[in-house]
């Protein structure tokens, strides 16, 4: 196991990690998958992670596999003094991690956006990958795989773990 210092942003840290892992690929015929996981999602389902990994490994097109949950909230965007609807909730998904990729392809996609100077325009590894390959598969996940970024989130996670 290697320790690799992260970057200044989450996306920079992902790029550094993927680039480092790609250094272990010995030749162009080697197929390896990499799971990119957001550390603020500690309640992810191992069975979802395994399903995503197997789907990626067995996909003839080596598509990326991303877990999601459907959006049940009404999403609106403020517009001056008014709140305007933006999307119908039926067409929105909340993407989660771990996202699973062909390591060589994800590394190649990251290298391309770095060379093109567009790296900062991408938010997630799936955005970087999709910009180059357009080949994604999705696996339904659970609401339990939420991000813990606030005190309320932490309280909810502790409640879930305490009641198991």
Image (tube, rainbow, N blue to C red):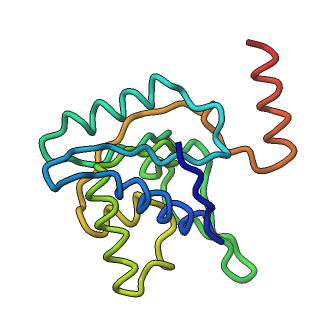
Q: Is 123 or 23 nearer to us in this picture? A: 23
x and y, in percent, of residue 70 in the image: 49, 41
Q: Is residue 69 above or below residue 36?
A: above
Residue furthest bottom as drawn: 117
Residue 107: which quarter of the image? bottom left
Q: Is residue 65 above or below residue 15?
A: above
**Is 40 displayed left or right of 34 in the figure?**
right
Residue 44: which quarter of the image? top right
Residue 145: which quarter of the image? top right
Residue at 71% across / 83% down in the picture? 80
Q: Is 96 or 20 nearer to us in this picture? A: 20
**Is 26 displayed left or right of 123 in the figure?**
left
Q: Is 150 or 115 nearer to us in this picture? A: 115
Residue at 43% across / 43% down in the picture? 35
x and y, in percent, of residue 91 in the image: 42, 51
Residue at 38% across / 44% down in the picture? 100
x and y, in percent, of residue 67 in the image: 44, 40
x and y, in percent, of residue 39 in the image: 64, 46
Q: Is residue 157 above or below residue 23?
A: above
Q: Is 79 or 16 nearer to us in this picture? A: 16
């Amino acid at each position: 196991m290697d320790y690799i210092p992260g970057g200044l942003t989450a996306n920079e840290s992902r790029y550094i990690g993927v680039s480092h892992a790609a250094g272990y690929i010995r030749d162009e015929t080697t197929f390896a998958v990499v799971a990119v996981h957001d550390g603020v999602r500690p309640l992810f389902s191992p069975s979802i992670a395994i399903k995503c990994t197997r789907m990626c490994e067995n996909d003839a097109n080596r598509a990326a596999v991303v877990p999601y949950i459907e959006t049940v909230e009404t999403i609106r965007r403020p517009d001056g003094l008014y709140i305007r609807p933006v999307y119908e909730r039926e067409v929105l998904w909340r993407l989660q991690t771990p996202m699973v990729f062909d390591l060589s392809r994800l590394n190649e996609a990251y290298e391309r956006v770095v060379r093109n100077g567009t790296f900062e325009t991408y938010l997630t590894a799936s955005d970087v990958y999709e910009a180059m390959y357009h080949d994604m598969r999705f696996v339904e996940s659970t609401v339990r795989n939420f991000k813990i970024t606030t005190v309320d989130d932490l309280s909810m996670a502790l409640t879930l773990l305490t009641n198991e």
